[in-house]
Image (cartoon, helix red, strand yellow):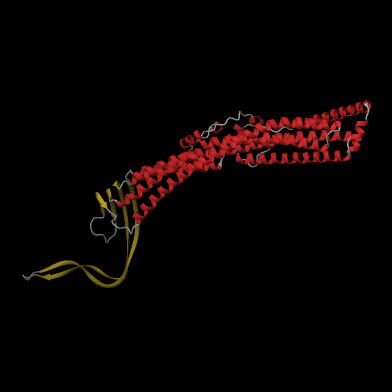
């Protein structure tokens, strides 16, 4: 290295002019090469999808959202069934039957008379069946038809119907809130995947800029070496840096492909074709609100907390419904029956009908402790739901604090990164200048390049982290995203 510096100091004005001409030519060739390489890339640009488009696609076919909607539909049917318990029940039954009866070895008879002598000496003849002495089997066919109807209306069941209805209605409200929260979760996952893909695209740009800069430095270092003003080790150091930047570009491209796959998965399209995203979404004012006001806002507006609150009320309705078994039951009923019996063995009329109505009171005095244990379990379910609500509120506060901290940290990292970029650009310029005049080493230039690339990457990371944290914080506070409109 020292020999290189001596050669540099020994150059005359003519040698220095030649070196500058060569460096200018190398810079021109490098720029032309970069422009030529950019031309085909521009012709193969991927379609750009906006964040709103990605959210819309995700909401169209989200399995988790469809599951929540189906659960909401089931809850709506529970409400309909609970209302139905207040209506009378009506049942109809129709029975048709044909049968054959065979009597074996029946003694045969014929029509005759039976004489009887009265007290006065008169003889009276009575009609009767006279055995003939023959024996044979007899088969008789018969048909039976019946129609019956029954109506029953429960008048009192210990208010169990009201408890069931209250539970079903609160369950429907909880399902509505859960569906809305699933909606917000889908939006949040798409936003995070979108900003991560933007992150990878921007980091790829930084990697390519670093690679191009390292290529220029390598050509410049090679020129210095051929002019005798740099050592072979300087060229090798810069070549290693250039190869590292090429590897960084490969890693960045792989991250982009993975980011596309992750975003496609969040949109429920895992086999979607490649696409690009809009890097302009990284523009932000880095505004951060006070965290104290967010707690109360979350308790008022957060949908999963509202679902938990409705779940508590639903469990109370369940307890009321179970407790109805401790009271007597009063029912009104009415019955109608019509029979048509064509059997030869039928006594009375062949066709008959009957109507009955009345009221019944029943009280299950002892059911082997089933109702009492059911009431105890239902009350325990109420307490569990209350504890779950309490825990959910505590979890919400912790989550808001964590996301707010991440937001503040990302904002500060972005601010530091902007200052670091300015310092790193100036540091690279000074390192290049010091090496040119022989006051610095090639390693100083390499370190300055790495510092500049790192500072640019940190700024991209901070912006993306800030936007992802803010989207998650909006969901945690219970604010409906503008992208969530369906």
Q: From this viewpoint, is residue 57 visible?
A: no
In x, y percent, where is residue 313?
40, 43
Residue 340 placed where, x, y %?
29, 54
Quadrant housing residue 227: top right
Taking depth in this image into account, of 436 and 276 the one nearest to the observer is 436
Where, by quadrant of the figure, is residue 60 drawn? top right
Q: Nearer the viewer, residue 359 or 392?
A: 392
Residue at the (85%, 38%) spot, across then down: 234
Q: Is residue 108 above or below residue 398?
A: below
Q: Residue 197, can we see it?
A: yes
- Give 238 or 344, whichever is nearer the viewer: 238
The single residue placed furthest to the left in the displayed view is: 120
Q: How many marks?
A: 0
Q: Is residue 123 left or right of residue 269?
A: left
Q: Residue at x 85, y 41 (%)?
A: 236
Depth check: give the residue in front, 321 or 93.
321
In the rendered structure, the answer to whether residue 435 lies left or right of residue 363 reads right
Q: Quarter holding the N terminus?
A: top right
In the image, residue 294 lies at what x, y percent?
Answer: 50, 34
**183 left or right, relative to 119:** right
Q: Where residue 286 sits in the image (x, y, percent)?
A: 60, 30
Q: Is residue 427 left or right of residue 344?
A: right
Residue at figure coordinates x 81%, y 30% from the top left: 36
């Amino acid at each position: 290295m020292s020999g290189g510096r001596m050669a540099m100091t020994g150059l005359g004005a003519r040698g220095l002019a030649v070196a500058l001409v060569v460096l200018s030519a190398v810079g021109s060739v490098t720029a032309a090469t970069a422009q030529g390489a950019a031309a085909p890339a521009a012709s193969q640009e991927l379609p750009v999808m906006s964040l709103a488009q990605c959210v819309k696609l995700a909401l169209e076919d989200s399995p988790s959202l469809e599951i929540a909607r189906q659960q909401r539909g089931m809850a709506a049917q529970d409400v309909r069934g609970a209302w139905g318990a207040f209506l009378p029940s009506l049942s109809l039954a129709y029975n048709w039957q044909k049968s054959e009866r065979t009597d074996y070895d029946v003694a045969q008879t014929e029509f005759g008379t039976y004489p009887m002598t009265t007290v006065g000496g008169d003889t009276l003849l009575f009609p009767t069946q006279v055995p003939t002495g023959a024996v044979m089997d007899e088969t008789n066919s018969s048909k039976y038809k019946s129609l019956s109807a029954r109506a029953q209306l429960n008048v009192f069941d210990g208010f169990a119907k009201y408890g069931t209805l209250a539970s079903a209605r609160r369950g429907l409200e909880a399902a509505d809130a859960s569906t809305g929260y699933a909606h917000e979760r889908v939006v949040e996952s798409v936003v995070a995947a979108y900003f991560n893909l933007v992150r990878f695209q921007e980091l790829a740009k930084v990697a390519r800029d670093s690679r191009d800069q390292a290529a220029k430095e390598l050509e410049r270092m090679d020129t210095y070496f051929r002019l005798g003003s740099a050592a072979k080790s300087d060229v090798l150091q810069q070549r290693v840096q250039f190869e590292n930047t090429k590897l960084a570009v490969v890693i960045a491209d792989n991250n982009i492909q993975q980011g596309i796959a992750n975003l496609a998965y969040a949109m429920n399209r895992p086999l979607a074709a490649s696409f690009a995203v809009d890097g302009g979404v990284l523009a932000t004012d880095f505004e951060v609100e006070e965290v104290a006001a967010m707690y109360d806002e979350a308790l008022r507006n957060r949908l999963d907390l509202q679902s938990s609150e409705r779940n508590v009320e639903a469990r109370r309705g369940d307890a009321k419904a179970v407790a109805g078994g401790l009271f007597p039951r009063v029912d009104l009923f009415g019955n109608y029956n019509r029979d048509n019996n064509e059997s030869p063995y039928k006594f009375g009329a062949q066709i008959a009908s009957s109507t009955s109505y009345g009221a019944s009171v029943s009280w299950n005095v002892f059911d082997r402790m089933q109702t009492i244990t059911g009431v105890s379990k239902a009350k325990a379910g109420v307490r569990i739901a209350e504890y779950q609500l309490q825990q959910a509120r505590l979890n919400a506060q912790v989550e808001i604090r964590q996301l707010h901290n991440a937001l503040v940290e990302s904002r500060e990292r972005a601010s530091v990164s902007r200052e670091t970029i300015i310092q790193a650009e100036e540091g690279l310029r000074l390192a290049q200048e010091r090496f040119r005049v022989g006051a610095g080493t090639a390693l100083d230039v390499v370190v300055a390049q790495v510092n500049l690339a790192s500072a640019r990457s940190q700024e991209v990371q901070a912006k993306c982290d800030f936007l992802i944290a803010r989207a998650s914080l909006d969901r945690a506070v219970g604010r409906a995203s503008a992208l969530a409109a369906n």
